[in-house]
Amino acid sequence: MTIDAGSVTSRGFIDLEDEHLAHTYSPLPVVVASAEGAWVTDVNGRRYLDCLAAYSAVNFGHRHPVLVEAAKKQLDRVTLTSRAFHNDQLGPFVTALARLARKDMVIPMNTGAEAVESGIKLARAWGYRVKGAAANRANIVVANGNFHGRTTTIISFSDDPAATADFGPFTPGFRSVPYGDAAAIEAAIDENTVAVLLEPIQGEAGILVPPADYLPAVREITTRNNVLFIADEIQSGLGRTGATFQCDNVGVVPDLYLLGKALGGGIVPVSAVVGNADIVGVLHSGEHGSTFGGNPLAAAVGLAVISLLETGEYQQRSRELGLRLQASLERLVGRGVVAVRSAGLWAGVDIDPALATGRRVCELLMERGVLAKDTHGSTIRLAPPLVVTVDDLDFAVAQLEAVLEDLRA
Ligand SMILES: *Cc1c(COP(=O)(O)O)cnc(C)c1O
């Protein structure tokens, strides 16, 4: 059967997915056909402001010209070599990425979950080879409410029933403690603890920003106990929170950064573990790898992404526009909004649960030309591309205000 895309209505595309796509998502009923900057256009020609930015993978906006040009140029040269051979993009990419992170060594991977998995393997190897943890007894301390990805090992330390039910048996070696409680981390650490793995802000949990002294305390505790501090900045990093890394905002330098999402410029999946050679260098030839990790197309796009971040322009936009977004969202508190948490252009908005679910609010926002995503219960998150304009932001908040007014009427 051939399907002429031009003749299928919006409903038709959704029906095709319903029938032939595993039902692991519940997307809003909008079918995107094209996009530019902070705006997407559906198959009927209707435009929407993208206030999710593919969970921050599109931080620089859809089809940023610098990124598209880097990808097109590389498409005409070479796209995949495997790591069996060198390519002329990978060296410049890892050099630039290490410099951006003020570290010196990179493990290039593809998806965020692979960066997390790589960080876990690296921390264990470091634990046995450098710290002297007992063989096969390494443990890693994580936080309740975490989201680090969807692989079997990663869901082993999730406490979200939807992520874990019927997927066991699980990988041992993880201890989960309350998020935001540094003393609980210290209490969980023993002689076989090799790492503490945290999101500097918990995104999927609802943009939970921990107390300002939390990450500095975690840094102090991990250093004192000879335990690695691994920051999962896959969503919080690369400009989203008004800095290159959210850790920068609280004056903390972790041992390992886990990066992904925006690192691929919204074009290709690119992820990485970034750290210093005394840690990353414990892995030797043949111990870890990825067929696509470090491929020349990914490296060319990743290098272009870093060139955008090196100007500081996007971090500054995120910081300045983020303050405006926070202020205008706060005006809705008491008018359908219960609480607002934000960092840069990343906001979690708790809607009064008596009014509507987060999902319902997102459906109504969609009808008004704004695409956002609910998290748990009645929380919605706003994370527009960092190229969003002041007018765009005002439009988004005005639509939210109108949705809430309608719901309260
Ligand atoms: C999205 C995300 C991941 C997983 O990334 P994928 O590319 O979906 O595998 C891991 N950690 C955090 C904090 C994320 O937001």
Image (cartoon, grey):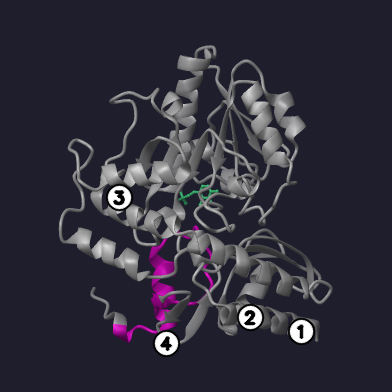
SS for callout 1? helix
C-alpha span from label 2 to label 3: 36 Å
C-alpha span from label 3 to label 4: 35 Å
Label disc, if present, on residue 299 of the rendered structure:
3
* Tag 2 residue: 394
From the viewer's side, name the closer residue of 57 and 278.
278
- Of tags 4 and 2, the one toward the viewer is 2
Q: How many marks?
A: 4
From the viewer's side, name the closer residue of 40 and 406.
40
**Is residue 156 in view from this perspective?**
yes
- Of tags 1 and 2, the one toward the viewer is 2
**Tag 1: Cα neighbours inside 10 Å, few (<14), some, or many (≥20)?**
few
C-alpha span from label 1 to label 3: 47 Å
Q: Amino acid at mark 1?
A: Glu
**The N terminus sits in image quarter:** bottom left
**The C terminus sits in image quarter:** bottom right
Ranked by sequence position, the earlier of labels 2 and 3 is 3
* Tag 1 residue: 405
Residue 69: x %, y % from top left = 27, 66
Residue located farthest toward the front when viewing the structure as drawn: 311
Q: Amino acid at mark 4?
A: Asn
Q: Amino acid at mark 3?
A: Ala
Residue located farthest toward the left when viewing the structure as drawn: 77
Is the C-beta separation of discs 1 and 2 under 8 Å? no
